[in-house]
Image (cartoon, grey):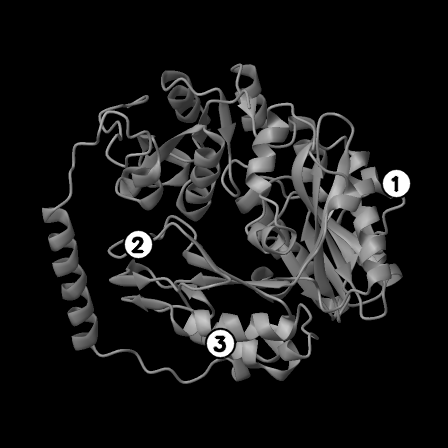
């Protein structure tokens, strides 16, 4: 491994996840933090940490100049962007390379080509990857979209060309409502991505969202690590993921894996990425998009393959060939991931901003928790309200579901509303147990997934907070705040006084 020090251009649980991979590879981890993240878990765990500005992402985690200043001043030789923020920003990847640093991810060209969905569709079609029937034309007016929708057949989906994360999407059943949907999607796309371009796709009503994890090195080897199913969604965003998919047969799995590899080869892809598909119960599947970054749900694949995707990202970026071939990759057992959010499912899944008085993650065989939150932290309105990802593994899907129930039951989060009761209800629903969830499941069965859960009384919350405070004082009384000289991963080696650009 020729990489020695990495700037992690992110925060929260994904920064913690990357720090863990760095430690195991002998790479020193450099964190960055905004004003409100000064005491965050990723800051405490990193070898070094530097402030980069105010809480607003534009002033901190999206500020390319400040990030590069930290990378140069701290002596980093590589940058890992995680997911979100600048992870799929072509200009940031290029700036990292121009600064003489290694970018731990796909090249800027691949990010650009796959970043605009209309361009991605046009690029992979010659490779034989199936596409959803649709319409795209950068200079099309509303009349052209209306005519195209008639040819495609209703319902249709209006989508942002440069979009992601469920933004800039409208499903239209009534032709009379298409102009309004176009206007709304255009406005949202411009605000979210700075790109108002739209395209149409046929809306597949019984769609299953199945994605294939791919890896490609710089030596001409491209392969897949099988699938994850992400059909359980709210507001077009995933909340439960699993592998293997209950939908796929061995033959369909082989076809989708081969299509994903061809899509990656078509763009000259390197490093880790995900090719997302819409699949139907009848065995058809269609290209949806390619995420040119690490996915939130990558632990599901790690659990069933036994491979560490983040460590492989570093090895590929360092120029190493993949240490295995396609036939060496095996899919064993079953894994499920639940995303725990500080949000209120009864109030349209709106974020529940506030302080997490107590967070006790579950523990036990086959349970993994990825989180950037600890007791006493606050959920900020500036960032995604995800508290943790709980991932379980067992020999069968039924056993994994049972294990997830136990893990969620043992998860303690006090001080903020979470979606844990909603997740429990989803996992217990007959449709989920039968493996028949499609992308409309949550909207269709929302009332069934909102069990009555009265809030804890204030006295219980106060008692929990006081108990944590007492425990922290006892631990603090015995803690050595000055690290030993040879403590390479001490949380107290943070460079608090470093400043970049004011």
Residue that mark 3 sits on: 424
In primary-sequence order, the first of circles 2 and 1 is 1
Q: Residue at x 32, y 32 (%)?
A: 53
Q: Residue at x 72, y 44 (%)?
A: 117
* Relative depth, front residue between 400 and 276: 400
User: Circle 2 — which element?
Assistant: loop
Q: Residue at x 59, y 42 (%)?
A: 309
Res. 127 mark: 1
User: Circle 3 — which element?
Assistant: helix
Whether pointer 1 and pointer 3 mark residues with C-beta atoms closer than 8 Å, the reply is: no
Whether residue 253 is visible to the viewer of this picture, yes or no, is yes
| Position of residue 47 measured from the top left corner of the image (x, y, whole percent) | 34, 31
In primary-sequence order, the first of circles 1 and 3 is 1
The quadrant where residue 487 appears: top left
Q: Is residue 493 left or right of residue 434?
A: left
The CA distance from mark 2 to mark 1 is 46 Å
The CA distance from mark 1 to mark 3 is 41 Å
In the rendered view of the protein, which quadrant contains the C terminus?
top left
Res. 374 mark: 2
Specify the farthest residue to the left: 477
| Position of residue 83 measured from the top left corner of the image (x, y, whole percent) | 53, 42
Q: Which of marks 1 and 3 is in front?
A: 3
| Position of residue 450 measured from the top left corner of the image (x, y, whole percent) | 47, 80
The CA distance from mark 2 to mark 3 is 22 Å
In primary-sequence order, the first of circles 2 and 3 is 2
User: Circle 1 — which element?
Assistant: helix
């Amino acid at each position: 491994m020729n990489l020695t020090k990495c700037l992690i251009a992110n925060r929260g649980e994904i920064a913690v996840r990357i720090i863990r991979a760095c430690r195991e590879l002998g790479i020193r981890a450099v964190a960055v933090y905004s004003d409100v993240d000064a005491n965050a878990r990723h800051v405490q765990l990193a070898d070094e940490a530097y402030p980069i500005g105010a809480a607003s992402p534009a002033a901190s985690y999206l500020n390319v100049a400040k990030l590069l200043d930290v990378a140069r001043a701290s002596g980093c030789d590589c940058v890992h962007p995680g997911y979100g923020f600048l992870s799929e920003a072509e200009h940031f990847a290029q700036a990292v390379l121009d600064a003489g640093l290694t970018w731990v991810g796909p090249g800027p060209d691949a990010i650009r080509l796959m970043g605009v969905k209309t361009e991605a569709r046009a690029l992979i079609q010659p490779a034989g990857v199936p596409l959803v029937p649709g319409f795209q034309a950068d200079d099309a007016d509303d009349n052209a979209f209306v005519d195209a929708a008639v040819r495609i057949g209703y319902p249709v989906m209006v989508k942002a060309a440069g979009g992601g994360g469920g933004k800039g999407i409208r499903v239209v059943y009534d032709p009379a409502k298409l102009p309004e949907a176009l206007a709304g999607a255009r406005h949202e796309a411009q605000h979210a991505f700075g790109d108002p371009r739209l395209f149409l796709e046929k809306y597949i009503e019984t769609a299953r969202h199945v994605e294939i994890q791919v890896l490609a090195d710089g030596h001409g080897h491209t392969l897949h690590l099988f699938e994850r199913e992400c059909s359980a969604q709210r507001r077009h965003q995933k909340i439960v993921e699993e592998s293997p998919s209950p939908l796929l047969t061995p033959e369909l799995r082989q076809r989708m894996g081969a299509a994903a590899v061809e899509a990656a080869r078509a763009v000259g892809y390197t490093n880790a990425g995900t090719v997302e598909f819409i699949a139907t119960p009848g065995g058809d599947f269609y290209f949806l998009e390619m995420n040119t970054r690490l996915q939130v749900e990558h632990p599901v694949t790690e659990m069933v393959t036994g491979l560490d995707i983040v460590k492989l990202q570093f090895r590929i970026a360092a120029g190493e060939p993949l240490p295995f071939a396609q036939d060496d990759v095996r899919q064993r057992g079953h894994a499920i991931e639940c995303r725990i959010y500080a949000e209120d499912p009864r109030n349209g899944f709106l974020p529940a901003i506030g302080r997490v008085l107590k967070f006790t993650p579950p523990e036990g065989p086959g349970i993994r928790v990825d989180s950037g939150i600890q007791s006493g932290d606050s959920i900020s309105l500036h960032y995604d309200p995800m508290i943790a990802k709980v991932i379980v593994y067992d020999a069968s899907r039924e056993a994994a579901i049972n294990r997830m129930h136990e893990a969620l039951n043992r998860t303690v989060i006090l001080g903020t509303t979470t979606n844990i009761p909603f997740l429990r209800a989803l996992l217990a629903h007959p449709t989920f147990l039968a493996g028949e969830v499609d992308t409309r499941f949550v909207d269709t069965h929302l009332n069934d997934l909102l069990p009555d859960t009265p809030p804890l009384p204030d006295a219980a919350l106060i008692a929990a907070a006081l108990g944590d405070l007492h425990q922290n004082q006892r631990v603090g009384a015995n803690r050595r705040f000055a690290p030993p000289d040879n403590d390479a991963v001490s949380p107290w080696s943070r460079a608090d006084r470093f400043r970049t650009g004011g």
